[in-house]
Amino acid sequence: MSSQAGRPPVWSYWLVLPLFIVFWGLFAWHLESPLLPGPLQVLETLMEEARGGQLWFHLSATLARVAVAFTLAMLLGTFIGIAMGRSRTANALFDPMLVLLLNLPALVTIILMYVWFGLVEAAAVMAVVINKIPNVAVTVREGARSLDYRLEQMATVYGFTRWQRLREVWVPQLFPYLMAATRGGLSLIWKIVLVVELLGRSSGVGFQLHLAFQVFDVAAILAYSLAFIGVVQLIELGLLQPVERRANRWRQPEQAHA
């Protein structure tokens, strides 16, 4: 079975989105309420923010935080997950902490980081990283536990270096788990970064949503939300899916005979 089987085709977006916009416009026209502006009003607000430069400034601030937090969380979480999957001692040491962090609300972590370190950029990024590391570690741990011991033996017989063993044996087997951690990580980090910005930063999409909420500017809330969702979808369609397809090419002959 193909890895793409459970994913809707791209054309479905071009069918569903126009229907959603039409329904949204009709519903807003029927209500005639400032609490639900129509698509054209939201688009006008979005264009004004873009022309004034505010949209690009705050989007770039949010994306920078996401990039830093995601990179740190993936590196640390992958290292911890591999160690836990390959060593019972490491698993015994880290597992109680992972359980604790997995059940700790993100809001609590954010507040504690701001209280302990102040309303600074490092505290904001640290709060996001701490919330994401456990998810990455748990996912990668399962992949490390499922590594084929026969391939390990082959690597030993052929005298693979550590780098060769990592590149040729471990990474191909861990790739599905890394992709799962990547997708889950991005979907979680987007949300946490917005909360971090709303509570303690003076830039970013979350900060703008906070300002718009204070004056009940629903058009601005929807404009920034849609811009943010658009960027997330571009990353998914333009980066993650092509990388996944390219990395899974070696599976195609096997899938064709399945």
Image (cartoon, grey):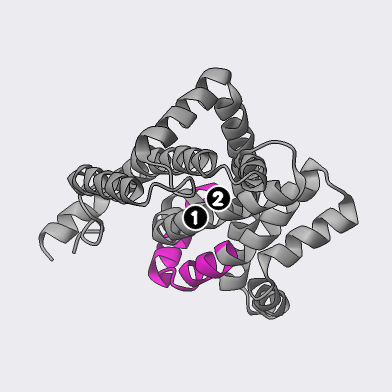
Would residue 146 be counted in the magenta stretch? yes
Please report the residue visible at 67 percent of the width from the left and 70 percent of the height from the top.
105
Q: Amino acid at mark 2?
A: Trp
Question: Between residues 179 and 103, which one lies in front from this camera angle?
Answer: 103
Question: Between residues 51 and 93, which one lies in front from this camera angle?
Answer: 51
Residue 55, compared with residue 94, is above or below; it is above
Residue 185 rendering spot, x and y as whole percentages: 53, 56
User: What range of the chain is rendered magenta?
Assistant: 136-165
Please report the residue visible at 82 percent of the width from the left and 43 percent of the height from the top.
120
Residue position for label 1: 187
* Mark 2–mark 1 distance (CA, rounded to whole Å): 6 Å
Along the horizontal axis of the image, is 102 left or right of 22?
right
Q: Quadrant of the N terminus?
A: bottom left
Dot 1 falls on a residue whose secondary structure is helix
Residue 218 rendering spot, x and y as whole percentages: 52, 45
Q: Residue furthest top?
A: 51
Question: Between residues 29 and 191, which one lies in front from this camera angle?
Answer: 29
Q: Amino acid at mark 1?
A: Ser
Q: Residues within 10 Å of mark 2 (few under 14, many from 20)?
A: many
Figure quadrant of residue 147: bottom left
Q: Tell me the number on the disc at residue 190.
A: 2
